[in-house]
Amino acid sequence: AQSVTQLGSHVSVSEGALVLLRCNYSSSVPPYLFWYVQYPNQGLQLLLKYTSAATLVKGINGFEAEFKKSETSFHLTKPSAHMSDAAEYFCAVSGNQFYFGTGTSLTVIP
Amino acid sequence: NAGVTQTPKFQVLKTGQSMTLQCAQDMNHNSMYWYRQDPGMGLRLIYYSASEGTTDKGEVPNGYNVSRLNKREFSLRLESAAPSQTSVYFCASSESLAGDTGELFFGEGSRLTVL
C-alpha cells in the first residue's frame, strides 16, 4: 500500500526565511509524487509533481522539491517566504489512487 | 475555462435529510473523484469513477452513493444525512485513473453542515 506522511501539521516562518515542509512516502514501486496547495476557501491546486524525469522538481511560485529515494522523502522548499505563501500544503502519492497526507498549514510572520 | 464546477457551495441540512452534490468538468477527463476534507485528516476518498459507466468505493464510502451521469458529470448523494457527514466535499477529475503522471484538478468545494 502507498501512503505519505507529512511531519508537522503547522509550520511558521518569518517573511523572507526558508520554507521547508516535510513529506515522506511509503511505496513498493517508484512513485509519482505531488505537492498541492490550498488557499483559504479554495480547492487544491498543483504546485509540482515528480515523475522520475529529474530528482529536483521546480514548481510554481518559486517552490521546489527534491526526490530522495534513499530517504523516501519529497520535501518542499522555498528559499524566501512571502506573505502570499500562507496556505495549507498537501503531499500526495499516486498509485492505483491518489493518497494524500494530512496537510501542513504554513503561517508566514511579517 | 471553468475546469471543475461543484454545486452547491454551501448547504445546511437537518439529520435525516437527503441531498445531492453535483459536479461537472469540462476538460474531457475520464476519471472523477469525490473527497471529503476534515481538520487534521487531510483528504479522504469517498468514491471514484475510473471512466464513464464505472464507480468504485474509496476509503470512506459508507452513507454515500454516487452516479456517473455521463463523462462530464459525477454526483454524490447523501440519502440520510448525519452530523458525522459535516465536512467540506471536493470533486476532482483527472485525464486517467491515478497510476500515471496525471494530476488531479479540483473544484472549489462544497461546505456541508448537518445539524
Image: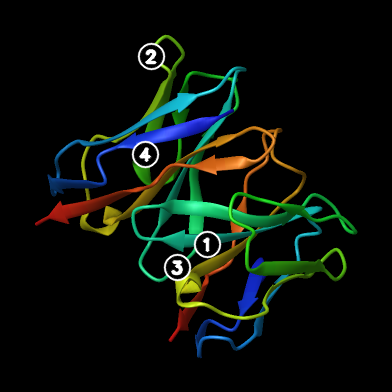
Which chain contains the residue that carries disc 1?
B
Examine the rendered structure and indicate whether residue A18 appears above or below residue A26: below
Q: Which of A31 and B103 is in front in this view?
A: A31
Q: What residue type is labelled 1?
A: Arg
As helix, strand or loop, the secondary structure at mark 3 comes to loop
Residue highlighted by disc 3: A42
Total number of numbered discs in the rendering: 4
Mark drawn on residue B36: 1
Dot 3 or dot 2: first in sequence order is 3
Q: Which amino acid, by three-letter code, is at mark 3?
A: Gln
Host chain of mark 3: A
Which structural element holds mark 2? loop
Please give the chain letter of the residue carrying mark 4: A
Q: Is mark 1 on a helix, strand or loop?
A: strand
**Residue position for label 2:** A71
Nearer to me, A13 or B51:
B51
Label 3, label 1: how far apart the Cα atoms are = 14 Å
Identity, as a three-letter code, of the amino acid under mark 4:
Phe
| Quadrant assignment, res B21 | bottom right
- What x and y, as percent, mark residue A48? 49, 39
